[in-house]
Image (tube, coloured by chain):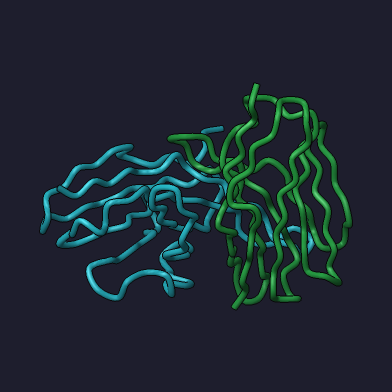
Chain colours: A cyan, B green
């Protein structure tokens, strides 16, 4: 049972280019979350999606950033016109739909995409 | 929204000693509390979790306690080993209209051989 798959593992972009980060959730999971992590810092929530719906994007910058989770295929985090401050590790996590006894289910993380903007 | 605080930010212990990491949360509606271990270059991995109807849970050398009244929960690692060295994150989940997780800022644990 494959875990959460993220690709690429490392991505280098020049300032002004676009970055596309992909995430395939665990089999059977329909909830996807994206987090950003700067070196030696915690996990900063960006966006929470279900299939074809954005549930919560309160942590995502209003400009240049977008996310989608289509009916078919992986979830995509897209960063347009990247700047040096976008350099970070971006983690995707997934969880199954619904709740377990009303308490929720854990997140399962991928190994991240490390974006470097030069 | 929920606010999760985690202490200490760094922790060094001798091999074989115990390590304790503490977290507090603010939203009384939070009812699920997972702990994650992140090794260098990898994503966080779930190591143990506790639900709000339980006060303590143990899995071999790892235990978690929850005090709902005081709104705090702790991770206890006994008989620490060098491979326990990693960054540990606590989280609280509010099941209200969705599954939103709130993470602590992490504790970097170093186990000295």
Left or right of residue A17, residue B9 in this image: right
Residue located at (71% from left, 65% from top): B24
Quadrant showing the C terminus of chain B: top right
Left or right of residue B99, residue A77 in this image: left
Quadrant showing the N terminus of chain B: bottom right
Q: Position of residue A77 (x, y in %)?
A: 32, 57
Q: Position of residue B64 (x, y in %)?
A: 80, 48
Q: Quadrant of residue B100?
A: bottom right
Q: Which residue is farthest top?
A: B113
Left or right of residue B93, residue A70 in this image: left
Residue located at (66% from left, 75% from top): B96
Q: Position of residue B29 (x, y in %)?
A: 74, 75
Query: Residue B52, relative to residue B107: is it above or below?
Result: below
Total numbered labels placed on residues in the image: 0
Residue located at (60% from left, 53% from top): A96
Left or right of residue B44, residue B78 in this image: right
Query: Residue A28, relative to residue B82: is it above or below?
Result: below
Q: Position of residue B10 (x, y in %)?
A: 59, 46
Q: Quadrant of residue B63?
A: top right
Residue located at (78% from left, 43% from top): B76
Q: Nearer the viewer, residue B48 or A105?
A: B48
Q: Quadrant of residue B32?
A: bottom right
């Amino acid at each position: 049972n494959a875990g959460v798959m993220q690709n690429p593992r490392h991505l280098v972009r020049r300032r002004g280019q676009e970055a596309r980060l992909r995430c395939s959730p665990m089999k059977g999971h329909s909830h996807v979350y994206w987090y950003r992590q700067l070196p030696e810092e915690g996990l900063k929530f960006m966006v929470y999606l279900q299939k074809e719906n954005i549930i919560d994007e309160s942590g995502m910058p209003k400009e240049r950033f977008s996310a989608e989770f289509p009916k078919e295929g992986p979830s995509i985090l897209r960063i347009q016109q990247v700047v040096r401050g976008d350099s970070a590790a971006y983690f995707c996590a997934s969880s199954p739909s619904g709740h377990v006894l009303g308490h929720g289910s854990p997140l399962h993380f991928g190994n991240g995409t490390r974006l470097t903007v030069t | 929204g929920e606010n999760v605080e985690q202490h200490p930010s760094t922790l060094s212990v001798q091999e074989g000693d115990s390590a304790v990491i503490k977290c507090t949360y603010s939203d009384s509606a939070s009812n699920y509390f997972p702990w994650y271990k992140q090794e260098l270059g990898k994503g966080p991995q779930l190591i143990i979790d506790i639900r709000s109807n339980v006060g303590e849970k143990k899995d071999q050398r790892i235990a978690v306690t929850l005090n709902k009244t005081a709104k705090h929960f702790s991770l206890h690692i006994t008989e620490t080993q060098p491979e326990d060295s990693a960054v540990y994150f606590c989280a609280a989940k509010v099941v209200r209209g969705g599954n939103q997780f709130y993470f602590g800022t992490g504790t970097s644990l170093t186990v000295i051989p």
